[in-house]
């Protein structure tokens, strides 16, 4: 396995095309949520086909998982052997996630404490906003293990926490990935990741009939195939031999991605529900492999070319509301990034991965 010089560890190797994939993932999820308020029928005409085409937009989360495996796994692989390996990684993750994330939780708790009764009285359902262990579990990133359906809450309150299960999956991944990279040799790591990617669909299939009432797709081990495939892509990208093979066999890569995309389209049309047997058995893995190939194609483009009850957008009023919501969301995100997140990220990146001891460098070279 070829490793970059330790001198390059911590330096930016950003691939702009991957930002485009992030944008695609976001758009898939948003498109899904804005088109699936009420299920339509063929009698609704074009709107029905728009909704059906967006049926698997939830898979944008899987694209995020593959990207996370590629990017975070790549950072950890580059920093392997650093004397500050764990310390620097977790400090950076802390400043990137914890302040803004905890602020979101505290804001909800403050709103419930000061205006919970008024919100309940004015809501259509009259439901009491939750403020117990199902909320406090978010501080420990175990909300994906708490059997509470936040999406059943009315209006904006149902969206306050319902999407954060994926962040719990990510944080649990952050606990395991550094240990795997630190403990497994470069020769053994790919085999372990391949085994995880193969075992995840088998376990999902075996447990599907027993866990239909509990959404196991929110639990990290059951979604580990996407994360593992992303890490495998990161390993492949760092091997000059593999990268050369990919560039000289780009047509094969395109053909494989095209076949996988065709299967993805069939899944979207015939089994769009993420809780279906088809998705839980092989669908998640199929989609993750497609996204991993898409990621490599995007990275190769950069390498070879550049270096050398929400409203529904299927109705006109819904589209107008969606446009306004998109503008407000962008403004809020921009302010959050400028005033809070970016300064905190800069603090986190002030902590650097230190060089490994001399004997560790020699060991990495032999590996």
Image (cartoon, helix red, strand yellow):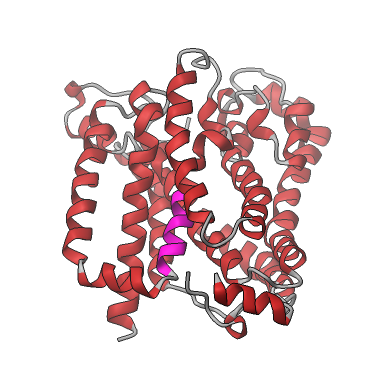
Residue 224 % position (x, y)? 51, 41
Residue 157's place in the image compared with 107, above or below, is above
Image quarter in which the C terminus is found:
bottom right
Name the residue located 77 percent from the left edge and 25 percent from the top edge. 117
Residue at 56% x, 83% y is 5
Spot occupied by residue 347 in the image (x, y as percentages of width and height): 74, 73
Magenta span contains residue 234:
yes
Q: Nearer the viewer, residue 178 or 90?
A: 178
Q: Residue furthest right?
A: 113
Q: Residue at x 63, y 71 (%)?
A: 79
Instruction: Give x and y (percent) for residue 37.
Output: 41, 29
- Above or below, comparing residue 20 to residue 308 in the picture: above
Q: Is residue 194 left or right of residue 218?
A: left
Up/down of 193 relative to 161, above or below: below
Q: Main secondary structure of the magenta part?
A: helix
Q: Is residue 324 visible?
A: no
Q: Is residue 12 left or right of residue 113?
A: left
Where is residue 268 shown, x and y percent of the image?
A: 28, 34
User: Nearest the camera: 265 or 28?
Assistant: 265
Residue at 17 percent across and 55 percent down: it is: 255
In terms of depth relative to the viewer, which is nearer, 341 or 83? 83
Within the image, what quadrant is residue 38 found in? top left
Q: Quadrant of residue 197?
A: top left
Q: Which portion, as a residue range, is magenta? A: 228-237
């Amino acid at each position: 396995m070829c490793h970059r010089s330790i001198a390059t560890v911590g330096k930016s190797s950003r691939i702009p095309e991957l930002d485009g994939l992030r944008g695609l993932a976001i758009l898939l999820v948003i498109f899904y949520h804005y088109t699936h308020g009420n299920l339509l029928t063929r009698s609704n005409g074009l709107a029905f086909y728009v909704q059906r085409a967006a049926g698997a937009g939830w898979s944008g989360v899987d694209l995020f998982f593959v990207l996370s495996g590629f990017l975070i796994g790549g950072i950890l692989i580059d920093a392997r052997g650093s004397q500050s390996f764990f310390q620097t990684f977790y400090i950076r993750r802390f400043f990137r996630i914890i302040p803004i994330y905890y602020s979101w939780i505290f804001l909800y708790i403050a709103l419930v404490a000061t205006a919970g009764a008024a919100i309940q009285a004015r809501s259509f359902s009259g439901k009491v906003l939750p403020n117990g262990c199902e909320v406090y579990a978010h501080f420990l990133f175990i909300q994906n293990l708490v059997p509470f359906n936040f999406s059943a809450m009315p209006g904006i309150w149902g969206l306050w926490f319902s999407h954060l299960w994926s962040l719990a999956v990510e944080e649990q991944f952050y606990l395991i990935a550094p240990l795997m990279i630190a403990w497994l040799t470069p020769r053994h790591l790919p085999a372990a990741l391949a085994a995880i990617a193969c075992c995840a669909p088998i376990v999902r299939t075996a447990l599907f009939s027993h866990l239909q009432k509990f959404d196991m797709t929110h639990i990290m081990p059951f979604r580990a195939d996407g994360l593992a495939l992303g890490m495998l892509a990161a390993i492949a990208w760092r091997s000059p031999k593999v990268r050369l093979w990919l560039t000289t066999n780009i047509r094969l890569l395109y053909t494989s991605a095209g076949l996988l995309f065709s299967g993805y389209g069939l899944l979207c049309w015939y089994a769009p529900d993420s809780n279906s047997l088809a998705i839980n058995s092989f669908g998640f893995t199929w989609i993750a492999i497609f996204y991993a190939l898409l990621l490599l194609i995007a990275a190769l483009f950069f390498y070879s070319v550049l270096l050398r009850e929400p409203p529904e957008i299927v109705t006109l009023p819904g589209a107008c509301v969606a446009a306004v919501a998109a503008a407000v969301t962008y403004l809020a995100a921009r302010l959050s990034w400028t005033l809070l997140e970016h300064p905190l990220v800069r603090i986190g990146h002030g902590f650097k991965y230190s060089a490994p001891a001399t004997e560790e460098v020699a060991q990495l070279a032999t590996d």
